[in-house]
Amino acid sequence: SRDYLEHITSIGPRTTGSPENEIVTVRYLLEQIKLIEVQSSSVHRISVDVQRPTGSFSIDFLGGFTSYYDNITNVVVKLEPRDGAQHAVLANCHFDSVANSPGASDDAVSCSVMLEVLRVLSASSEALHHAVIFLFNGAEENVLQASHGFITQHPWASLIRAFINLEAAGVGGKELVFQTGPENPWLVRAYVSAAKHPFASVVAQEVFQSGIIPSDTDFRIYRDFGNIPGIDLAFIENGYIYHTKYDTADRILTDSIQRAGDNVLAVLKYLATSDMLPSSSKYRHGNMVFFDVLGLFVIAYPSRVGSIINSVVVMAVVLYLGKKLLQPKHKTGNYVKDFFCALGITLISWFTCLVTVLILAVFVSLIGQSLSWYNHFYVSVCLYGTAAVAKIILIHTLAKKFYYVNAGDQYLGEVFFDTSLCVHCVSLVALTYRGLCSAFISAVWVAFPLLTKLCVHKDFKQHGAQGKFIAFYLLGMFVPYLYALYLIWAVFEMFTPILGRSGSEIPPDVVLASILAGCTMILSSYFISFIYLAKSTKGTMLALTSVCAVTLLLVCSGAFFPYSSHPAGPKPKRVFLQHVTRTFHDLDGSVIKRDSGIWINGFDYTGMSHITPHVPEINDTIRAHCEEDAPLCGFPWYLPVHFLIRKNWYLPAPEVSPGDPAHFRLVSKEQTPWDSVKLTFEATGPSHMSFYVRTHKGSTLSQWSLGNGTPVTSKGGDYFVFYSHGLQASAWRFWIEVQVLEERPEGMVTVAIAAHYLSGEDKKSSQLDALRAKFPDWTFPSAWVCTYNLFVF
């Protein structure tokens, strides 16, 4: 696998439509597949097909847009028994990469693993019951186009009953199962039974499918357009260098490749010999609760069983608390009142904890020191974590001193334990009611503490919070706390790098501070009682406040620089540089404006503040101004992420003159019998183009020849079409239909087309090279040439 990986990445960046992707990589894959075929066992039959699909679809990713592809490349291999097969399991990877990245983890390593799995399976003398189809797709980075071309058009697609998708959201490490289904619990059981090194989490699945993470995979295409269940695996570690020049083969450990290969081989072999695969529709209903235990093994059970377990746990809490709350008043004293007061104080402490860290985060963001923890994660813990803990301790210390003046320490400790138990129980009920499989976490956080409390209750009553009680209490809390810390590690492993590429509008410190506050609330919940059992909290408060204050001073002074170019673990700042010539036409076709410049987008909240000292010409005097009458502000957006990145810069530069200029023309304008206007266009140009539409007041876009025929708006109300082609594509001809309710002098619709030159000589310009050379080594400037033409009709 490593030999395959190093050869593919040595080709360099492999954007769809480039010779590196369409010719060199495809030729290498076919050569290796041919060698594997020669060495294969006689019990198998191998068929190879190179597919060049053309198609279109709409997707609700990034606010919604439409995609069109022409003559892109899929290399498809079918391994089946000598007598053929009626059913198949699909393994999918993609060999294309984003521009300016060698794409080792995303996704050359997965294709390398699949080649090796194909070699091992084909050389085995053990016959398969079903076919295994290996899809090496050449246009995933073009927003999932190649998988759509395969699943909607290839003749072998009808054989597929399940799939495994191999992806990356980081570089190396363990590959996490972060999506399964939809439904089809038998697939999770298959993975748990077969995988040699299982690593899976239903929590990751529900977080990813919530849309919080701005990413998507081919899993969506097979699910939505193929109606096929599957398993989505991805490398998640070290997302700092994902989609950058640092995503190289040498950063992926051989252990990671071996581990992934062992798992994929075992699961594919299991499915290809499974009796369930042909009749998978019989087992499709129901979801699974699944989670790994510290990466050692996976626990999985049906969600209905999870609901029963959750209900039993809730009933146990109801009985435990009900017995206390419903006892006669002369026995319980003021327990009911104290319980609800404790609940109120706990909620107040959590609310003030959140407000405190948010105030800190907003302050840090306003003074321009956002992301100070990006290269030093401990800074976030020392700043926001200590503030959160200190605030919770302060509120409870004040409550103990001024409200619970005459109450005993043991009594208060018990009341606040019961309060925390109640809060987690309410959380368990809410998550179970919403049908979320992640409710198992709340069940763990209720069941183990309750059992612990029942076991140590007698000793606590007799001797108070002595050493024996504390030891047993900590032992009982070990499981929920260990698992919570394990999950929290995974959350920060994935989310921290994402906050460095989440756009200019979301303050990352606010997000991270909120997550840390939430983690503090959960982790402190069962230890609040110790605040009331402790004689004094002054020392703890002083230590926490001192750490927070010192860290804040250091952050304000700029002591913690967010980025790093350290060879062992780079954490670069991402910047897009597009050298563009823009031409704006009026209703008569005359040019009313023409300019050229380098359009600059920073992918994080800090904008260009850290870059300006190194490149003085990039400053606030050249901030880009939105062209209000143009779709997406009149700039050549590669993807519709305009709502995530509103701060950009436009540095004047000479015009670009690519050798393969884009051409766009109106072919025809027709009045339809249903009183709409049909505009037919034709476009030719490089492998990647973006088409934008904005209807004028009194006009609506009723239909078009793209997707399923129904126009899909992006955020903001404009329409965005992502276009790409492989080699030797014909002119792109399409039409839009505009319903004119009221004719206006400014026309009915504005359209624009941007041509992106992502490979070859046309991608370069001397001005881009000169500007990029000025950027410090802790940045990753991804640069290309483009043109933008706007027309009014």
Image: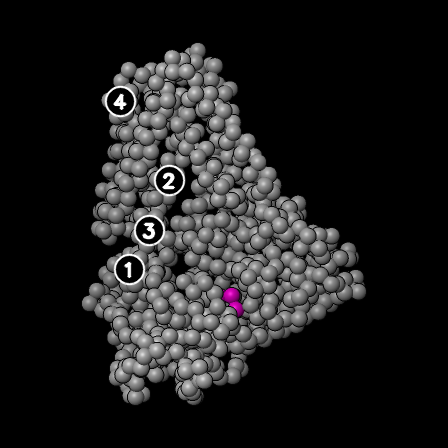
Earlier residue among tags 4 and 2 = 4
Q: Residue furthest left?
A: 621
Which mark's residue is nearer the viewer, 1 or 2? Answer: 2
Earlier residue among tags 3 and 1 = 3
Q: Which residue is mark 3?
A: 508
Earlier residue among tags 3 and 4 = 4
Q: Is residue 625 magenta?
A: no
Please state the horizontal and vertical placement of residue 388, each as a whole percent of the image: 31, 36
Which mark's residue is nearer the viewer, 4 or 1? Answer: 4
Q: Which residue is mark 2?
A: 518
Quarter location, residue 300: top right
Is residue 104 rendered to the left or right of residue 131?
Answer: left
* Amino acid at dot 3: Pro
Earlier residue among tags 4 and 1 = 4
Separation of marks 1 and 2 at Cα, in angstroms: 28 Å
* Amino acid at dot 2: Gly
Q: Residue, x 31% and y 40% (percent of image)?
A: 354
Separation of marks 4 and 2 at Cα, in angstroms: 26 Å
Q: Which residue is mark 4?
A: 403
* Amino acid at dot 1: Gly
Q: Is residue 144 magenta?
A: yes
Which mark's residue is nearer the viewer, 4 or 2? Answer: 4
Separation of marks 3 and 4 at Cα, in angstroms: 38 Å
Q: Which residue is mark 1?
A: 607
